[in-house]
Amino acid sequence: VSAPDDEITEMRRPLIDLDDAEALLSGTAVPPGLEDLAGLLQSARLGPTHAGDPLESVAVAAMTRPTVVTAPKARAGRRGVLVAKALTAKAVAALVVALLGGVAVAAAAGVLPAPLQSTIARGFHRVGVSIPGAPRSPGRATTATTSSSGGAPFVTVPATTATERPGPGTTDAAPLAGADARTRDEVVRLCRAYRADASAIAAGATPELLVRLDALAGASGPARYCATALAVFPLQRRAEVSPREARASTGVSDHAAGTAGGRSSGRTAGAGHATGSGRAAGTRGSAGSGHPTGTPGGSNAPASSAGSSGVRRRASPHRGSAAAAALSAGTLRAPDRHGAGGLCRSLPPAASAGDPDGHRSVARRANRWSK
Amino acid sequence: VSSTRGAPWEDLDAAVGAAFSGDEAAAAAVFRTVQPSLVSYLRSQAPGSAVDDLAGEVWLAVARGAAASASSLDQLRAVVFTIARRRVVDLRRAERRRPAVPLAEHRAGPAAPDVADLVVQHVSDGAAVDRLLRGLSAEQAEVVLLRVVGGLSAEAVAAVTDRTPGSVRVIQHRALRRIAAELRSEAVMP
């Protein structure tokens, strides 16, 4: 049995380990038996050439030029610019998202300034999102309906207004708070007509108006209903429109209304002027409001203008009449509610005779506002 | 391992730094040291192509700053042979896409080698390289070339060829065993 040639060759092959291979390739040592291999490797190693290579002058000139070093920096700069652009775009996008999110959260919380809040609320309102300050949509606003039970007022409050903060003195008229301007105007018009012609209504001359008011008022009765509506709705309207618009619509001058209202409440005026002539003249509410010292105001407190008889500064019967008309018309400004308690007694006798309780409730409610 | 024979700069590591600082003598010394091994490597890896053109492209890339961070001759060699290897790879891909076969030579068939060329080739350094790489695989020939002709370390070869140093040592070990076996067989059967 003869061994194959390969096995014979393998047996004759000198042993080369990794260290021997490394020494041969690096030229540091020649292992025994591998001299021919080391000689071949050494002959393959090339020494430096001498001058005369045509490429030498070109390569040397290219290496020694000062501009060649700036090439990689330019590439790195371009890459850096791209990265910086990407990061800048991301940072700007994140900032915009954060700002919009913050504004949206602030708008939802209702802590933005009023103009901005109303603007954003209108924008949200258009897409069906309700946030504080949103306008009342006519289609979704309250509608006056008759109450089947008869006792409660008749205005349904939409869900969008349920989160609104109720104003003071609106406890009795809370269901009325959501009425829109159109409904309020209609109710005020009916109530004014009812109050202006109370005697004829009592005699049954205008049964149609009475039927409508009865339908609206339910068990509370037209008189009480109108008293509450005329006290609450104008205040709501005042809170919604600007003072200039209110003056233009009502025709009541600012000064007149302000003086008619006085600076103190009727209760305080009455206490401070308990012995004054205002009580004797039947103008307890505002007769003494301009006289904290208890000085009798009888000189400027005629019976026809009792509402402003006690006003301290430039009191005028005309101003008192205007304020009384404003209160009667339900257009008294919010700051002028202080004197409403006294002014309510200056209403036409017919109206007062028709529903004295209603006017007292107006006075109580106005005094509650003044607190 | 670098020889400083005939170079005006004894310290070639310092010559590398001086060359990129504008010293022409240092640049010439570096070029004369690296150029022969570069040409030998290119001639072995890209036979039949314009080796001088490839070498010129490599030096142009070096001059453009590819080796600006090199502070020693070994680092410069690593950069030079990395560029050369990529040029060879690009050349092979281009030849694979557009194979060029000279019609005249195809018709005439393989020409008989000139005796004078055989003599010159036998006595030149290229003959030793060809003999060294005979019978080796492509990766073994590349590693041996870079180690012997390029003068790179095992770690530098690993970096140039995208291998681990251990893989390079295994490849070079197998290559030397095969070369030794070839030499032994030639000695037994001349």
Image: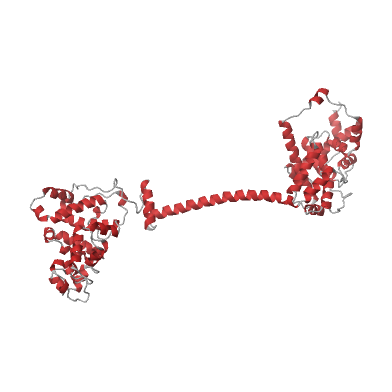
Quick check: B110 left or right of A334?
Answer: right
Q: Is residue B34 visible?
A: no
Q: Residue at x 30, y 58 (%)?
A: A242
In the displayed structure, A21 sits above or below A161; it is above
**Image coloring type:** secondary structure
Residue A32 or A116: which is nearer the viewer?
Answer: A116
Q: Could you say where residue A140 lies in the image, as x and y percent from the top left? A: 29, 46
Q: Could you say where residue A171 lies in the image, as x and y percent from the top left? A: 24, 58
Residue B64 or A228: which is nearer the viewer?
Answer: B64
Q: Dividing the picture into quarters, in which one does residue B126 lie?
A: top right
Q: Residue at x 19, y 52 (%)?
A: A189
Q: Could you say where residue A195 lies in the image, as x and y percent from the top left? A: 14, 56
Residue A158 or A52: which is nearer the viewer?
Answer: A52
Q: Is residue B127 visible?
A: yes
Residue A268 or B156: which is nearer the viewer?
Answer: A268
Q: Could you say where residue A186 lies in the image, as x and y percent from the top left? A: 21, 50
Spot the residue most to the left: A203
Q: Residue at x 66, y 50 (%)?
A: A76
